[in-house]
C-alpha cells in the first residue's frame, strides 16, 4: 500500500497541473516515460504505442529489505563485501527495491527503489482520458537497460494526430 505522500515535499498537483497546463497551452499531448524501480516489463502491447501490458508496475510488490543475496534476498554481493545490512538499507530508503537484476554473463547489475510520486505524476497524464485517447504515460523498469524504447517507438509511429514532422 505504498502511496505518495506530500508531507514536506511539494504537492503532487504542482507537477500534474504543470504538465496538463503545457498540454492545454500548446494543444499537444504531453507524454512521460517514468523509468523507476518497478519490475522489468515482460510484455508490451502489440500495437502502438506499445505500452506495458505485463510486468512493470502491474507486478510491483512493495516490501521491506530482505536479508540474503539476490535472488533469495535484496542484497548484492558488493553489499556483503562492504558490510551493508538489509536493516541499514531499510532505514536509508524505507522500502525495499522494486527490481534487481544481476546478469553475470553481461556484467549488468541494477537495483532500483519504487518511486510512487513519479509513477503517480505519470499516471495522472492518462487520468480522465477517453477510451480512444493516446496513452501519455509509460512506466518502465530502471533495471531494464533498454527501458522505454518500446513506448518511444510507439509514440513516434505514424498515427492520425501524430504524423512525422509534427
Image: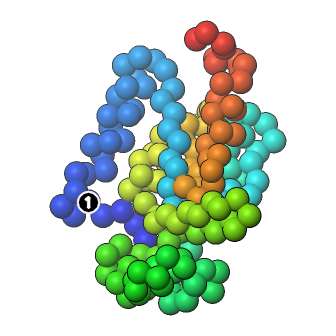
Image-based side of 114 in relation to 166, left or right: left
Colour mapping used in the image: rainbow
User: In the image shown, does 21 or 152 lie closer to the viewer?
Assistant: 152
The reply to whether residue 131 is visible in this rendering is: no
The location of residue 84, given as percent across then percent down, is 40, 83
Residue at numbered disc 1: 6
Identify the residue at image location x=64%, y=18%. Answer: 162
Picture quadrant of residue 136 = top right
Determine whether, in the image, residue 130 is placed left or right of residue 12.
Answer: right
Q: Quadrant of the C terminus?
A: top right
Is 130 displayed left or right of 158 in the figure? Answer: left
Residue 39 picture location, percent across and down = 61, 64
Residue 124: quadrant of the picture: top left
For the point 38% across and 56% down, the residue is 117
State the residue at coordinates (52%, 50%): 35
Can you give x and y, in whole percent of width and height, for residue 55 in the image? 68, 61
Q: Residue furthest left?
A: 8
When the figure is inspected, residue 84 is found, relative to residue 9, above or below; the finding is below
Amino acid at each position: 500500500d505504498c502511496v505518495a505522500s506530500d508531507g514536506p515535499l511539494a504537492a503532487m498537483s504542482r507537477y500534474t497541473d504543470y504538465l496538463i497546463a503545457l498540454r492545454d497551452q500548446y494543444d499537444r499531448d504531453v507524454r512521460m516515460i517514468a523509468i523507476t524501480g518497478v519490475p522489468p516489463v515482460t510484455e508490451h502491447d502489440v500495437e502502438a504505442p506499445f505500452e506495458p501490458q505485463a510486468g512493470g508496475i502491474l507486478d510491483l510488490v512493495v516490501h521491506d529489505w530482505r536479508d540474503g543475496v539476490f535472488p533469495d534476498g535484496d542484497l548484492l554481493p558488493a553489499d556483503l563485501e562492504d558490510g551493508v545490512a538489509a536493516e541499514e538499507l531499510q532505514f536509508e530508503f524505507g522500502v525495499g527495491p522494486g527490481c534487481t537484476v544481476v546478469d553475470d554473463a553481461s556484467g549488468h547489475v541494477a537495483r532500483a527503489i519504487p518511486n510512487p510520486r513519479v509513477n503517480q505524476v505519470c499516471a495522472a497524464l492518462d487520468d480522465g482520458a477517453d477510451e480512444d485517447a493516446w496513452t501519455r504515460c509509460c512506466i518502465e523498469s530502471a533495471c531494464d537497460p533498454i527501458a522505454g524504447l518500446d513506448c518511444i517507438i510507439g509514440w513516434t509511429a505514424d498515427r492520425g494526430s501524430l504524423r512525422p514532422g509534427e
